[in-house]
Image: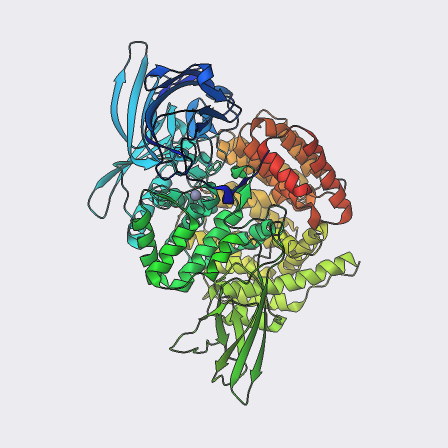
Amino acid sequence: PRAIHLKDYRVPPFLIDRTELHFELGEKATLVKSRLSMRRNPDSDEGDAALQLHGDTSLVLRRLQLDGKDLSVSDYQRDDESLTIAQLPDNFVLECVTLIKPQENTSLEGLYKSNGMFCTQCEAEGFRKITFYLDRPDVMSVFTTTIVANRQDYPVLLSNGNPVEQGEQEDGRHWCRWDDPFKKPAYLFALVAGKLEQVDDSFTTQSGREVALRLFVEPQNLDKCDHALASLKRSMAWDEQVYGREYDLDIFMIVAVDHFNMGAMENKGLNIFNSSCVLANPATTTDAGFQRIEGIVGHEYFHNWSGNRVTCRDWFQLSLKEGFTVFRDAEFSADMGSRTVKRIEDVSLLRTAQFAEDAGPMAHPVRPASYIEISNFYTLTVYEKGAEVVRMIHTLLGAEQFRKGSDLYFERHDGQAVTTDDFIQAMEDASGIDLGQFRRWYSQAGTPVVEVSDDYDAEQRRYRLKVRQHCPATPESDSKQPFHIPLAVGLLDEQGNDLDLGDGQTTKILHLTEAEQEFVFEGIDSQPLPSLLRGFSAPVKLRYPYSAEQLVFLMAHDSDGFNRWDAGQRLAVDLMQGLISDYQQGRELVLDRSLVEAYTKVLSDRSLDPAMVAKLLLLPSEAYLAELAEVIDPEAIHLVREFVKRELAQALQGLLMDAYRHNRSEGDYQLNADAIARRSLQNAALSYLMTLEQPRILVLAQHQFASADNMTDQLAALSLIAHSGFESERQQALSEFYQQWQQDPLVVNQWLSVQATSPRDDSLTQVKALMAQPLFDLTNPNRVRALIGAFCGQNAVQFHRADGEGYRFLADQVIALDKLNPQIASRLLTPLTRWKRYDSRRQALMRAQLERIMAGELSKDSYEIVSKSLA
Ligand code: HT7
Ligand code: ZN
């Protein structure tokens, strides 16, 4: 397979002004008729170039007509990926009839069937599996879509835009025509046909237009729609208030489908959602699930402007829409709940998974320079780091100028397909702030390291920060230019109060632009303690030699909530790294008192929000410790983390029990910030207490499991019991849970994940046994992620078993899946790609499995990941 390079971008030689589609949906095959009104692009320098339409090898071409005249095989050329027609006039109508087989499409790209329902997924390049087309985001067209299908099996027929006509046929089939007045690229096309029920709502926009909101689900899910609709209305109101963006069609539809490769898709007016990201009720959905749904509903809705009205010129610009939209959804969630907690969650994800990506073989800039398969670039770098880059622009410009910049961007580029550079240009033009050097965040991969040292001159009352930045090499480049890094800094006095850094400011943004810089603070009366990178103001690794005492002080006093939490994480990381080394050297493990003291203060401080207490109590994850390690030792990391947790539980038993009892509410379930916060602390406390392996605590967990009126409490208890050493009790809880929830596929997925993430030695055997049961289905990505993905990605100690069986298992699954669904196969590969981070024995075992995968015939998706990993 060949790589595609950003530097080779050319404007499209042809444009499609109008796209008329006609689908005859059938049980054996579907007939797709297209009528494309086309013309040569006046901006193209390719003269009388031939027309090369994208078209997957699976398309059966039945008929091709140019301006009403049939073309014969000698008039065009066909290969595996395209159809080429030469000698075309400047304006013409091309009509095409293709036959496709959605029933056999397990890739879940293009048109496919999920539980008897037809649905589409066209981003990034799925439309070419439906018909021949210029399937690139800079070709934008208005679409009219007619769908014909059997009325009994497919009473609901949906596409983008507004419904304009419908009718019946005599053969039991009916049809519906949809018209989308907004120009869009083919990746935003959608079609759904099925036996669906709907829940209706409406939203009145700020200019007084009434928009119909409609959520389509399978009948058994009608009781899981309220939260998504409420989230949608909150999103619509928020985008009006914060960005001045109004919805533009008369109807906004969401459809829930069970078989879906990602979370959701922002098709114009017809969002399609993975059912796991939209359906919710308290009995089946955890608090985290509710919050996730709100965020994803917001994300897809916000794409209507950042993605649909203004789209990407090419797929290298993916972060233009994704980074910006993740930033928008994160701010929305922060406004709906706790800003600090949301920031902690986002940074945790970035620092574990995105930093690991930056340190691995697939490292790439936020705007990649090349790809083999674009689906592999829907990454944490493009999404989460891309959002951090937009957040830094927000920090550099301030809220007001940023809003002016986004207004200018939307106004200037409405209806266009543009680049990340156009986005920055709008921000620069609106604010007058130079973002020249800042642009490097888009073109250079890697996580910068910022090293800070300081000195205080009491005589001169002067405090100085010395800052160095460097960025490690990544596959595309080993020499990096300095980044423009906004470093948010506060200084604390001996009482823990913020110093005034000028004009009453307690946080100052330092602009790091060079490899080494010095920043001087005058008029400082005594040695301050710096609070650095407040709010995680840039996606960097910060190094400063804090002592344990200073970290405990910051944990108690920093006015920046994020840095209070981060001080606790640093303290725990420092201690745990020491213990990991003790364990490796065969030394006895002893927990330093500083952590016990810090956690005692946290648990005793009644002024703290329980959600914040729960976050402060959460030890750094195994994944984060792994990311920080020079050579990853999964066993040592796991054992040390368990040891620290148990020691803390022992020392803080009384306080933890108080926290559990004080925050536990039996009955009277509520879904609000306060109740969610209390449940999070209650379950954090129980998780510590369960490490003591005391029967009286087991009874508490069992009682919680049996009496829970919500999934947060029930699942937390199940997972603790199932991961414990109480053998018969764990089996009983797992079996009771399955009996209770076997009819609900989304809950069954959670049940599978609990078992897949068990650190017990038999978990791989259990996973294999579950895969052999009829409930498992390799063609359902949610099942695959819940079981195989969870075992390989979230159960490091068992996946990295010394015998290499975890690696062999993953390779077997990838080889099988690659034939069915290449996108899911290539994503599953991630843990194997990190092989260079492990000891030489594990390296050899992992590499051998990558080579075994490479030896077979592979999709472009998996080929790219495996070949880059082995390079
Ligand atoms: N923009 C959507 C991306 C997406 C996707 C990409 C590749 C393959 C399948 C996919 N499904 C959805 C989702 C989003 O970021 O909003
Ligand atoms: Zn998105």
Q: Quick one: 545 or 359, which is closer to the camera?
A: 359
Ligand 2 is in which quadrant of the figure?
top left
User: In the shown orientation, is residue 727 left or right of residue 423?
Assistant: right
Q: Residue at x 77, y 61 (%)?
A: 588
Q: Is residue 609 above or below residue 503?
A: above
Residue 448 drawn at (x, y percent): 57, 60
In the picture, residue 221 is in which quadrant? Answer: top left
Eyeballing the image, is 591 above or below 791? Answer: below
Question: Which residue is drawn at the image coordinates 72% and 58% (left, top)?
Answer: 580
Pick whichever, 690 or 432, lies toward us: 432
Left or right of 167, for residue 697: right
Whether residue 99 appears in this view of the structure is yes
Where is residue 395 drawn, in percent x and y? 42, 63
Which of the image's four quarters has the C terminus?
top right
Q: Depth check: 318 or 1 in front? A: 1
Is 403 situated above or below 69?
below
* Quarter of the figure with residue 472: bottom right
Q: Residue 752's spot in the image, x, y percent?
A: 58, 36
Query: Who is closer to the viewer here, 335 or 86?
Result: 86
Outermost left residue: 208
Q: Quadrant of residue 851?
A: top right
> Is 724 placed left or right of 318 in the picture?
right
Taking the image as drawn, is residue 342 in sight?
A: no
- Count of marks, rendered view: 0
